[in-house]
Amino acid sequence: MTEHANERRYGSTTYQSSQSQRNIDKIPDFSFCGYAASERPLPDQLDVVTLLQPSGDSRDRTTDIQRALDAVHNVQPRTTPAVVLLRHGEYVLDSSASILIHSNVVLRGEASSTGQLTKMIIRGPPREVFVFGRSDIGRQRNLGKARILDNYVPVGSRIVRVDDVAPFATDGEVVVERNVSREWIAAMDMDKLVRDGKQQTWLQEGTKIYHRRKVSRVVSKDSSGGLVELDIPLVDSLDTAYRADGQLIAVVPPEQTQQAGLEGFALVLSPSWASVPLDGTPNFLAVSVKAYVQDIWLRDLLIIGFRDGIVLENNARRITLLRCRFIKDAPSNAARGLPSEISLRATQVLIKDCSTDAVHRSDSYSVVTQAKVTGPNAILNWSSTGQGKLMLSPHQRWATGLLVDNCQATKIEFGNRGIMGSGHGWTCGASVVWNSRSDILQIQRPPLSQNYAIGCTVGQLAGGKTNDGLIESLGHRVLPASLYTAQLEARIGVDRAHVVLSQ
């Protein structure tokens, strides 16, 4: 988006949440999103070790591509990614098998001299076409845990006080486990959701919400415990007043795919599934990123004809989606639910310079968060064109730490869905819309959190519902022009940030 003369400058990107006079919550730091936490650019200067040529006919190339990926992966030792390059042309994938992309392997399509992408024609039964990681990796191992002693841990905090620091070491993996209590559910007004005379469940009492982090340092130790500093500020609060307290758990995550990429392809589903309803039958996915995958990227993809495009699973992290374009080539069928271009369950995801183009009337969630997603996650420079309702919106059951920055959509909605679905309730907290445009904007404030819309231009605020979130400078862009960029520059320096963002 271009800047305008009437932009208003903000001297700080930190705001105090208005829900409490005693507790100070900050806008989250979203600069940790993306591959390598946005501390270095996506790898470009990589060795090309395998070349495949288009066959010029309609035979299935799934096995050829998988064998090439396997061969590169099996070269030991490999500490940096290498490229399997598909020469420009068309490749048919007509199989029931998915293509698995391994650690330290990049599958790249060669662009033509005019910039046209290498095309994958996808046929056959419904499946996940490209997959990062495996589903059968087992569970993380817990090495020890400690009770968090703070009465209140605010959004934006990196330090927690625990009753025992023995399980924790610098650079060690941890999760902050947050309790979902009956008292917290009631304080959020989520205990009275009734639909057709039946109680609806927003979040089950006793549910745990997890924030993946690493230990920056153990600050102090004494007989009553000590302080542990985390690498990334938290995007949700812990509050003993509502028994929404927590534990810090030292963990060893299962081994999973990392340092891998998919780039430079037009993925064309033939025939199109864009009009197929959500009815419980098997579905196509262009890309599936499994749990615990980290430091991978999707770049320069054109995804055509898919009902649902990309799913990023729980506990995956540090992922960049760059210049991914989704074309809805047929009207959507929303009788049983809306499709989504990107379904977000992961953390530290950066979605940058991506778009949806609805050729026909198509309603969809361009990017949607699912239940209990803990950020930070950031959407930067998203654009939506064409016909239909194309939304950037959390969907259900408490996602925290989402940034929508310099985006354009038909509707941007951060709020309470109440009894919709089976009790979706509050969809998000500690989430920000910054210098964005939408035909309809809804920003609501959860009782114990806050949502923000700053510097946004809208056709209208959503009618029939309150808009009691923190809405500032409506109709006037603000400075910094991009919250994510400003936070990244503040953290790693302007020069390094420019290198990361200039790709």
Image (cartoon, helix red, strand yellow):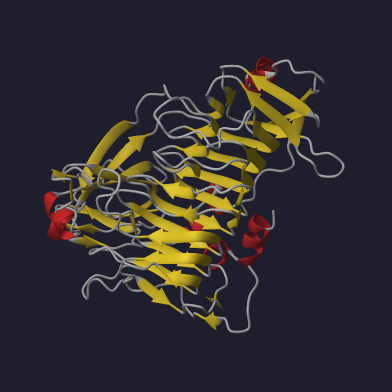
- Above or below, 417 against 300 in this view is below
Q: Where is residue 317 in the image (x, y as percent from the top left)?
A: 47, 43
| Picture quadrant of residue 49 | top right
Visible in this render: residue 231?
no
- Above or below, 472 against 265 in this view is below
Task: Residue at the far right: name it.
Answer: 113
- Above or below, 348 against 461 in this view is above
- Above or below, 90 against 184 in this view is above
Q: Disc count in the image?
A: 0
Which residue does the image show at 61% across and 36% down from the upper left? 305
Which residue does the image show at 46% across and 73% down from the upper left? 454
Q: Is 499 left, or right, of 458 in this rendering? A: right
Visible in this render: residue 236?
yes
Q: Position of residue 146 (x, y in %)?
A: 21, 45
Q: Position of residue 54 (x, y in %)?
A: 80, 23
User: Which image quarter is the N terminus in?
Assistant: bottom right
Depth check, front residue: 184 or 285: 285
| Picture quadrant of residue 44 | top right
Depth check, front residue: 215 or 108: 108
Which residue does the image show at 45% across and 71% down from the upper left? 460
Q: Where is residue 297 in the image (x, y as percent from the top left)?
A: 59, 41
Depth check, front residue: 106 or 471: 471
Which residue does the image show at 34% across and 27% down from the upper left? 139
Q: Is 324 left, or right, of 468 in this rendering? A: right
Q: Is 262 left, or right, of 432 in this rendering? A: right
